[in-house]
Amino acid sequence: MTDTAIIEIALHTMVVALKLSAPILVTSLVIGFTISLFQSLTQIQEVTLSFVPKLLGVGIALLFCGNWMMHTLVTFTNDLFAGLPAMLN
């Protein structure tokens, strides 16, 4: 296995991880920013106010994107295992 193959696998792994985490992180970021803006406009200084909306938003994001996320992860794993014999030579 060459160093180029290892770097290619690592790069592909990082891209897949970024793709899989993006829907959850973007949803949490948008909801957190919206609630923070609401808190600054109304001067409500409650730290726990954003927890439940973020939890619901992330749950909804997982509901909508979960199938795609699982398909992406299974495809990546199958491609990785299918390519391993060629990389070991």
Image: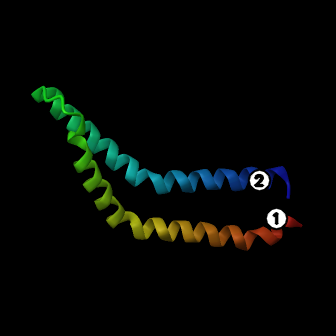
What residue do we see at 64% from left, 73% from top? 78
* Amino acid of disc 1: Met
Which percent across, then down, holds residue 24?
38, 52
Query: Label 2, on which residue?
Result: 6
Which quadrant is the N terminus positioned in?
bottom right
Which percent across, then down, holds residue 25?
39, 47
As rendered, which of 36 and 8 lies closer to the eye?
A: 36
Q: Is residue 16 left or right of residue 79?
A: left
Q: Is residue 76 above or below residue 7?
A: below
What residue do we see at 23% from left, 39% from top? 48
What residue do we see at 20% from left, 40% from top? 49
Splitting the image into 4 quarters, where does residue 76 fall?
bottom right
Which quadrant is the C terminus positioned in?
bottom right
Judge the density around disc 2: few (<14), some (14-19), many (≥20) Cα neighbours within 10 Å. Answer: few
Colour scheme in use: rainbow
Query: Label 1, on which residue?
Result: 87
Label 2 and label 1: CA atoms lie apart by 9 Å
Judge the density around disc 1: few (<14), some (14-19), many (≥20) Cα neighbours within 10 Å. Answer: few
Disc with the residue nearer the chain's start (2 vs 1): 2
